[in-house]
Structure formats: C-alpha cells, structure tokens
Amino acid sequence: MFNESGKIMLRRSVGRLLETGLLVLAVALGVGAAAAGISLLAGIRNYSNDLLSSPEYREIVVSTHGNSEDMEDPVSQKPVRETTVLTSEDLAAARVVPEISYAYIANRRMLHFINEASVAREEEMRQNMPAPPEGEGGEPGETDPFRPLMYGSEDLAEASTDETILIVELEEARGYAVSSDFFTALGLQAKAGSLFTEEDYKNPTNDILLGADLAEMITPEGKNCEDLIGKKLLARDGYFTVTGIIDTDNTSYGDSFFSPYRDGSFGGFRMPGMDTALRFSVDDPKQLEETAFLLSDWFTSLYGEGQITVSNPRAEAEQLVARNTGIGVLILFLSLTGLFIAAVNVSNMLMSRALRMKKHVGILMALGASRKKIMVLFSGEAALITGAGSLLGALLAIPLSRTMQGALDVAGVSLLYILPGVLAAAGLTMLFSLLPIRRHTGTAPAEAMHSA
Amino acid sequence: MITLSTIGKQYDLGTVKIDALKNLSLTIDRGEYIAVMGPSGSGKSTLLHILGILDTASSGRYLLEDYDITNLPDREQARIRNKHFGFIFQSFNLFPELSALENVMLPMSYAGIAYSKRKDRAAALLEDVGLQHRMHHLPTMMSGGEQQRVAIARALSNDPDLILADEPTGNLPSDKGEEILTLLESLNQRGVTIVMVTHNDAQAERARRTIHLKDGSLLEQDSLQGGQSNLQASGEAIHV
C-alpha cells in the first residue's frame, strides 16, 4: 500500500502517537466547532426560508381581543367591547383589498376520543367525586344533573360491536374548524376520499377530514388509511364521520383533523368558544403591511376603535428569523475563530515536525525524490491528520449542532448540513498544513542534509 | 564522464559572502577512484555536493556525458541523482524507521521499479555486502560498520555511474573502516567510478587519483599511475 517513503511518514506518525493524537484532536475540535457553526447557520437559513414561505406567514389575522389572547402569535393588545363577535360574514372584507387572494377561518378545536382508557378515567373520577349533600339531588344512585356527562363501559362495549364505528386509542386530537377557502389557500388536497362540499359548510354535519399522520396513527393494524373513509370516530361530542384524508406532506397539519366551520354567534352576543379569527392571505408578502393597514381601517370603521386586533404573524416571524440569524452568525464567527486557532496550531506543529525531518528530506532528495514527491509525501501526512481529525470533528459536530439547533428552536434541520461544514473546515486546515510544507521543500538537498 | 568548467560557489551570509569554490575545473573519467583531500573549509564537501547536484554552482558549467546539467529543473535533477549517482555519507544517513532491506529499496521506488523487483535486488545487494542475515533489522539494531554497508548497498541500488562518498569511514573504528574501503575498492575494480572525500592520507593513497583543495581552489592532484604529484593552478582542467 505504501512505498518506502510512505512507510517512513507512517511509522514516524505512529512512533509519535501523542503528538499525532494531539494534532488530530486539534483538527477535530476546530473542524467540529466550525462544521457545527456552518451547519447551524445553514440550518437557520433553511428553516427560516421554509417558515417564511409557508402560507401561514403570508396572511393577516383579524381577531377580537379575547380571541387574540388565545393565539400563539403575539399581537398588540387593545381594549375591546366584550360583545364584538366576528363571523364568516366578515370575510367579505377581502373585497376591500384587491391584494387579498383568499380569506378563510381556521379555528382551533379538540376532539376527545372515547376509548377504554378514557372510560376507566371517567369511572375513577366518578368514584372520587363527593356525594351530593343530603336532602339535595335525587335518590341515592340517581345521576347528578350537575356532574359532567359520563360514558360507561357498557356504552363503549355497544359501540365496539358496530363495524362502522372506530374506537380510537388516542386520548385526544387537535384540529381546526375551517371555512371553504382554507384548503385552497394552503394548497391542501385530499389523498383519499374528498374535501368538504359547500353543502357541508352550510348544513350541520359531523364530517371530518384527517391529516395524513393522524390517519396513520389511528388506522388499525393490518388496515390501510383509506379504510378509514366512512368510519365513525367516537368522541365526547358525538360521532364524527371520516370523509377524507388530506395530503399534508411538508405542512404542519399532519396530525390535525379538520371540520367544517359554522358560525356560532347567537343574537350578536359574544359566546364562549364562538369567537373567530379571520385570515386573509396575499400572494406577495410585501403587500402584507399595506393589507393589514387597510383591513385595520375597515374593521375599525365597522366595529369602532379598539374592537378588533389586526396582526401580521410574518412580522413576528421575521423578527425571530433575524434574531436566530444574528445568533447563528455570532456562533459561526466564534467557531471559525476556533478553527483558525486550531489550524494555526496544527500548522505550527506540522512545521515543527517538518523541521525535525529536514535532514531526512535532504537525504530523500539525494536518493532521487523530487520536490513534488516530497510535497506529496508531507501532504499525505497532513491529509491523514486532517482526514482523521475531520472525521472525529464530524462526530463532535453532530451533538453540538443538535444542541445549538435545539437551543434556537430550529431543531429538525438535516444533519447533512454538517458535511459541507466539515469539508470547508478541513480544506482550511489542509491549506494551513501545506503552507509550511511548501516553504520547507524549497531548500537545496545539501542545505537540508546539514540540518540537525 | 564528468566535466566541471570554472565552477564557483558563493554563499551569501548577508553582510559576508564566502567563496566555497573558486573557478574550479575538473574532469572525471569512467572507472576512476578519486580521493578529495583538504583542510576543513577547503570546499571538499561543496565539491561533492555540486558533483552530486545536491547543490547548484553559482557560476561555471557542469557536463555529464556531454550533457549540460548546470541549470536543470528540479524534477530532472532528481532523476539524474536517482539514476546516475549513489551517495555514501559519514553518518550513514539511513532511515531509522525502515529496515535494512527497505532502506536499500528506497531509491529504487523513486526509479519506478516494481515492489517485488526492488525487494529482490535489495536482498541481492545486501547479500553482496555480507548482510543477508540483517535484512529485516532496523539500523538502530546494527553496528556502525553494518550501517555503512547498508548505505553502500543503498548507493548501489540503481546501478549508478558514480559513487560519491563523504568521509565514509569517519564514524567507524579502523577495522570497520578498512572493511568499507576494501568494499569500495572492490566496487571500483568492478567498474564503478568513486569520488571519496577523506582527511586520511593512508586512505587517499589507496585511490587512483587524489585531488587537494585549499580555500575553494584546486591545489594539486596526485596520480597513482603517474606516481608523481602535479601542482595545478586553480581554474585549469585536470584529466588523468
């Protein structure tokens, strides 16, 4: 594998194991830190691009004060009158702003499934509840009308015998009550079954659509997701019939369900759980600010000053992206500084090794080695050290990168970003290693042989 | 075989310039055995380095078989060193990481000889110098005399036209030195040209020609065949 001159270098490296080990470690630390830094910044950029290109960040959210408090996206709080309620009719505001492409509602909701575990929990709760005071309520054993609705194991057993009913083992599922434009605005399509029809939005039905991941989770063993179509899911609010499964690849809706939105306002009074956030999406994010301004004007003229909150989630996301990018750049700068220091030290150590070998270089040249061959020989040694260090550095970079990405909440970014980081850092280290070697091989053989 | 014409070598030490060789002219024929003598600093080693293209002359002309090699590119110089010259040093200059066999194989690897061929040839050469039982030993496990015999085998590995020996017995006890000289003489008898730097008059007398250097100039040459000492002015070509 190695010729005689290669054996000299290899045996020297092995003979100076501590020194070689320190060199490899220095390269590993430098490369590891730099690769993690590069990977982090690349990850942040990728994550930010994905985040900002998602449809949710090309929309303006209009909500009442009470509703905005429930939202994850921070918005400025304004005093509101408690009776203001937004309904699907308010989506008509889209006509005021030509830039708006879609207007829809996506209210969060939950489904609490009934299954053996939930029934056991409820029965335990029932037993632990205090008995009604004497003289109040009905006869012993009679159901207390103020207690929450309970489901017994008999009910569950009865449901289990019905082939059209699917008992879901999950405790609960998160989902959205959506208006008709929701699926179009987000580009979501049914991979099985069908989307809601206009009739579904108008008439009260208990039809639901499932995100692909949720469908996968609740599909019984040995069955396909498509087999869920037409099945009824037993939940506290009743039975929900699955009419379709949504293709949710590359979205955050995989584990969600969707039901048709219906206005819940009653006589113009704000009712708990009936409040609604309206979403107006535009094609070009640059138009968001102006759209927000126009919508704010519109709703202020409609409901009065301070009744409605108009928020731009993209602005908050952009602030988050800017903060993360800043931190990423700082970490990259620090890690590159570490790499530079490591590379300079490696360069010095290799220079020292090369100086100690100067006489031997002269002898090799006397025996017929050209400068190019000597260069290749030393480069081989530098490449071996850089290669081993980079491999170790890549292994260090993986947990380091994960930790940093976790700290900045950009986890889930592909670790493949470490690879270009390792290559770039290894290239820099190699360059620093070759500089002293190049200088070293410029000496005449006679002069080199006279070195100690 | 070799013609040096008005070769000069100057070392620039910043404020001081030292003339290690001054207008030296010399001709070496194939099959010669030349001893180079002179006091320390007279330019003996510099002459040897110029002859072996281990250093380049500051002025003058170097012809090898009528081929001007004064200013060749590095790659060509390396090829000529590898193919035409064999070096024997006072401190042996073997690689401690390599066995005797591998040390002898080393110059052949630069000549592009296949592993099995260079291994066979290295083994044969070590056998020639009486070290067949030490082939796989590291230099550190060998005596000075044995190490120098490995160095001689290494110098012969590419069947060179000229052996350049820089005080080859300088680090050896007299009996071992005698063995090395006998070996060199036998090589010369087989047709190998030898140029040997030495301080030892007795060793120089065993050469066919002796060159005396002083202050970088060729002072005189003695020819065994002529049985007389010819004083030459520096700058004149000498051919015996």
Image (tube, coloured by chain):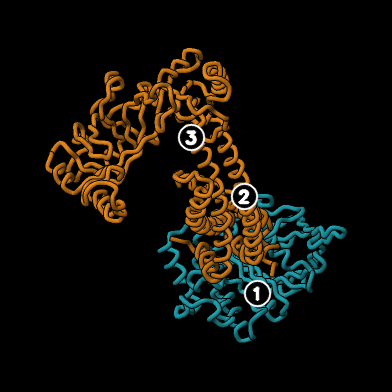
The three-letter code of the residue at mark 1 reads Gln
Residue A51 is marked as 3
Q: Residue at image x 38%, y 24%?
A: A266
**Nearer to us in this view, B54 or A142:** A142
Residue A268, image quadrant: top left
Q: Residue at image x 67%, y 54%?
A: A439
Camera-side mark, 3 or 2: 3
Give the orange chain's letter.
A
The three-letter code of the residue at mark 3 reads Leu
Camera-side mark, 1 or 2: 2
Same-chain status of marks 1 and 2:
no
The answer to whether marks 1 and 2 mark residues whose Cβ atoms lie closer than 8 Å is: no
In the image: residue A192, left or right of residue A421: left
Q: Residues within 10 Å of mark 2 (few under 14, many from 20)?
A: many
Residue A254 visible in the shown view:
no
Residue A336 is marked as 2
**Nearer to us in this view, B210 or B128:** B128
Give the cyan chain's letter.
B
Q: Residues within 10 Å of mark 3 (few under 14, many from 20)?
A: some
What residue sits right under mark 1 in the picture? B90
**Nearer to us in this view, A25 or A3:** A25
Residue A450 is marked as none
The three-letter code of the residue at mark 2 reads Leu
Residue B56 % position (x, y)? 71, 56
Give the secondary structure at mark 1: loop
**Nearer to us in this view, A182 or B41:** A182
Considering only order in the chain, which callout, 2 or 3, is on the residue closer to the N terminus? Answer: 3
* Quarter of the image with the N terminus of chain A in it: bottom left
